[in-house]
Amino acid sequence: MAPAVGTDLEYTPPDGGWGWVVVLGAFISMGFSYAFSKAVTVFYKEIQEFFGASYSEIAWISSLLLAVMYAGGPVSSILVNRYGSRPVVMFGGLLSGIGMILATFSTSIIQLYICIGIVAGFGFSMNLQPSVIVVGQYFLKNRPLANGLAMAGSPVVLSTLAPLNQFLFDNYGWRGSFLILGALLFNCCAAGALFRPIGPNTPKTKKDKDKAIQDEDPEKVNISLVEPSKVVIPEEKESCMTKFTRALDLTLFKHRGFMIYLIGNVVMFIGFYAPIVFLAAYGKHLGVDEYSSAFLLSILAMVDMIARPATGLIANTKWIRPRVQYFFSCSIIFNGICHLMCPLATGYLGLVVYSVFFGLAFGMVCSQIFETLMDLVGAKRFSSAVGLVTIVECVPLLLGPPIGGAIVDTFGDYKYMFFECGAILVAAGLFLFVGNFYNYRMLRKEAEAESRDQKEDIEMKDEQNLKKHDYDQVSTDEKAKNDNEVLPAKDNSEKCEDVNGSGHQC
């Protein structure tokens, strides 16, 4: 069983109030960030024909978008630690919208890589990380539920965008569609405006800053308050590496639970997104019409929409929350099994059934992916942990879809791609399950050893105090005995003085 969930924040999260408005903002911001890479796949078949690209080449659009979105995590975390979540998300919404608008004027596949993959992808990274972090700052007791609701933004936006994109393409082409989508992404700026600062990131007033400085060094403050123009307090110079390590806690790479989580997720992400990227194209490959193929993504999204908050509620129960790491591992295994069974679907009805189970499994994983990380490292180190995890995970996200596309190009069939993704996810889930079992076992042993050491220290201190007490008692007794031996002589002297006035003649 996992250790009890606690908090290492310097304040008590409200677990409600304005926090639910923050969840709404995260719902919008994270919805566009996660759903966009899936919804844009509706255009891939036509873009592929327009530029004469292969399956592998067209898959690089989503790969670059996801990789840059995750690779920008450390930059986003540093900016959040410095400026807070609100301005970072507003900047990300502006950047992602500009990237999509610029993609409208692309004349080659390389320009799509740059505009959508790099520019818009970096904007999404500015949307994603702060949204995850700010929810963790507002919630503790209800955090799994809040994360589940915020993460539900992805399927809600996806279920809307998938058919909308097909409608936009039929009426305006892919260029006009990208222009409209770019305008929609500016809504992330409004979502970011809802992220009111809280806790340690709340800006202090001048009075609070002066008081804090005075507590550290009253003399410097008193002097600076009297003569601010003449006094200059020297500051120690810091190297760039020192500033970087202070912004991102690199000691997390020595954290056993964090490393287990990181390795398992790196393996998982190799096969996590490729099935979504090629789902609509797979439907068209089997002879399903365009709208029905796009509707598969909507089915997946609608089930995902219900699965995420429902999983958050289940994960928040007293039976599951202490074991949330095992629940997460089983969800990944279930996801992999769905992909292994997908090639059995040879018609549209089979694809609908696969989309339902895939949406359920996908929602279960996504609802817990950040909750499990916070459960391992704590809320205080979560900002750094997210940044470090995302920059490492960008590599499998970059390679996963192109590897799936290369498999399709090689064999001319999608089923081998689904087999590859399913096997990878099952392996990742088994690794996380065994790794977390080992981690919790070691944590129990370390806690027991620490308890024994503390008990021995207490016994040793008690024994030392007892010996000191006995020594002090013996010293007191000897002193009293010596005093008793001296006192009679003094009494005789005083007696003599009483008799004849001189102690020398007694």
Image (tube, grey):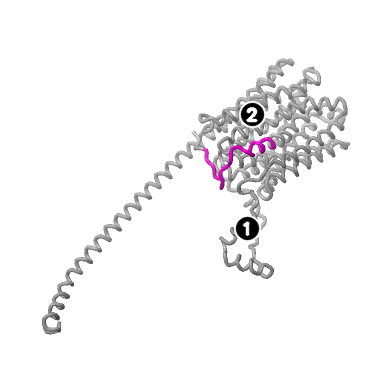
- 135 horizontally vs 317: left or right: right
Say whether residue 16 is magenta: yes
Query: Which residue carries the number 1 mark?
Result: 207
Q: In which quadrant of the rendered view does residue 352 lie? A: top right
Closer to the camera in the image, 179 or 397: 179
Q: Is residue 121 above or below residue 504?
A: above
Q: Which residues lie in the magenta part?
A: 5-25
Q: Residue 181: horizontal and vertical position, in percent?
A: 81, 33
Report whether residue 423 is seen: no
Q: What residue lies at 69% left-to-right and 48% top-to-bottom?
A: 79
Q: What residue lies at 71% left-to-right and 22% top-to-bottom?
A: 299
Query: Which residue carries the number 2 mark?
Result: 308
The label shown at residue 185 is: none
Question: Which SS class for mark 2?
Answer: helix
Q: Which amino acid does label 1 sit on?
A: Lys
Report whether residue 188 is seen: yes
Badge 2 vs badge 1, beta-carbon distance below 8 Å: no
Q: Which of marks 2 and 1 is nearer the N terminus?
A: 1
How busy is the neighbourhood of tag 1: few (under 14 within 10 Å), some, or many (20 plus)?
few
Q: What residue lies at 61% left-to-right and 65% top-to-bottom?
A: 221
Q: Which of marks 2 and 1 is in front?
A: 1
Q: Is residue 194 above or below residue 205?
A: above
Q: Residue 243: horizontal and vertical position, in percent?
A: 65, 54
Q: Residue 138: horizontal and vertical position, in percent?
A: 61, 40
Q: What residue lies at 34% left-to-right and 49% top-to-bottom?
A: 459
- 476 horizontally vs 460: left or right: left
Q: Residue 276: horizontal and vertical position, in percent?
A: 72, 27
Say whether residue 324 is magenta: no
Q: Which amino acid does label 2 sit on?
A: Arg
